[in-house]
Every structure is written in C-alpha cells, then in structure tokens.
Amino acid sequence: MFVALGVLFPIMFHSVGLGSIFLPMFWPIAAAAFFLDWPIAVAAAVLTPLVSSLFTGMPPVSPPIMQMIMLELSVLSCAIVVVYRRTRLGLFWPLLIGLIFSRIMLILFIVIVAPLFGLPPKLFSLGLLMQGLPGVMTMLIVTPIIVSRIKHEPIFSNRKHVIQA
C-alpha cells in the first residue's frame, strides 16, 4: 500500500507542477515508518522509486536521481523507525529527525556525485534543499496528523503525564 501511494502521489503532484517542491514520494514512506519494522520500511523506501521509475520513467535513472531518492528514503524511513521505536517522542520528532538525516544524505550524495556530472556540489545541494523546503514543512504538519488519527497517538509525546498530588 505504501509503495503504491509512493508511486501515485508523485503522479498527482507532478501533474500540477508541484512534484519536486512537495516531495510527494516521501510522504507515504515517512508514514510507513510509523507502522512497519525497519527492514520492511527500508524495503518500501527502496522499491518505491524503483517501481515508479519502471512504470512512469520518474525519477530518472540517469542522472542518478532515482538512486539519490532511494538513499534519501531509506535513511528517512530507518531513522524514523529507530527514533520512534526507541523513544517516547511522539510522531513529530522522529519525523523531523528522519527528515534531517535524509537531507544530510542528500548533501553527501550530491557532494560525491555532482562533480561527476560537472555540477557545482555546493550550489546544487543548496538548490535542492531550498526547493524541497515547502514539502518538508508540509510533511511535518500533515504526516503526524494523519498518523496520529490512524494510530490514536499524540503528535508530540507518547509519555504519560503523571500528576503529583
């Protein structure tokens, strides 16, 4: 289901020219990380861009956008699963931490790969980070609300508040 949504959301967003701005493939994969164990969440993260590329041609294999998104989504899902399962930080904080780690992976990938294509790594990575900022901000609002409604968990903390008498 998450892989299918990860293929369908980009089709919808790209049809109105908002795909690379709102990162629609990231949304279902981020949500999946709150429901699945890490190996399955990471498998969904790897399969989603691959299946999308095979059926729609997007993301492209060359330049290595598909591979970049596979790495980003894998890091995103793995970080969310680990932080969510090992802490009681609620839904928002694991998502934020996962997004930070995925953005770091994006920068590392670009620093390594951009020179191979004659692109300036610093300018290219800054451009991609800024381009995806609306998607990151929207995801930080929408994803925790949707997951919270499905799982019946608080968005910001899973800790039980104890009132001392």
Image: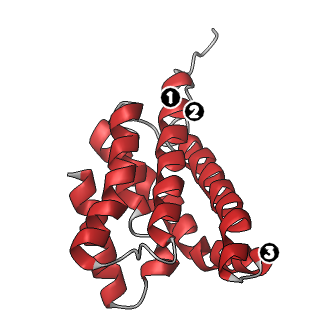
Q: Residue at the top extreme?
A: 165
Mark 2: secondary structure: loop
Instruction: Name the residue carrying label 1.
Output: 158
Mark 1: secondary structure: loop
CB-based contact (under 8 Å), mark 3 and mark 2: no
Amino acid type, label 1 = Asn
Horizontally, residue 108 falls left or right of residue 146, namely: right
Q: Residue at x 76, y 74 (%)?
A: 121
**Location of residue 124 (image quadrant):** bottom right
Residue closer to the observer: 46 or 22: 46
Considering only vertical position in the picture, is 147 above or below 83?
Answer: below
The alpha-carbon separation of the residues under discs 1 and 2 comes to: 6 Å
Amino acid type, label 2 = Leu
Q: Residues within 10 Å of mark 3 (few under 14, many from 20)?
A: few
Mark 3: secondary structure: helix
Residue 119 appears at what percent x and percent y? 71, 82
CB-based contact (under 8 Å), mark 1 and mark 2: yes
Q: Residue at x 46, y 57 (%)?
A: 70
Considering only vertical position in the picture, is 165 above or below 129?
Answer: above
Q: Residue at x 21, y 72 (%)?
A: 55
Considering only vertical position in the picture, is 126 above or below 106?
Answer: below
Tell me the number on the disc at residue 89: 2
The alpha-carbon separation of the residues under discs 3 and 2 comes to: 33 Å
Tell me the number on the disc at residue 127: none
Task: Say whether disc 1 or disc 3 marks the residue closer to the N-terminus.
Answer: 3
Amino acid type, label 3 = Lys
Tell me the number on the disc at residue 122: 3
Task: Say whether disc 1 or disc 2 marks the residue closer to the N-terminus.
Answer: 2
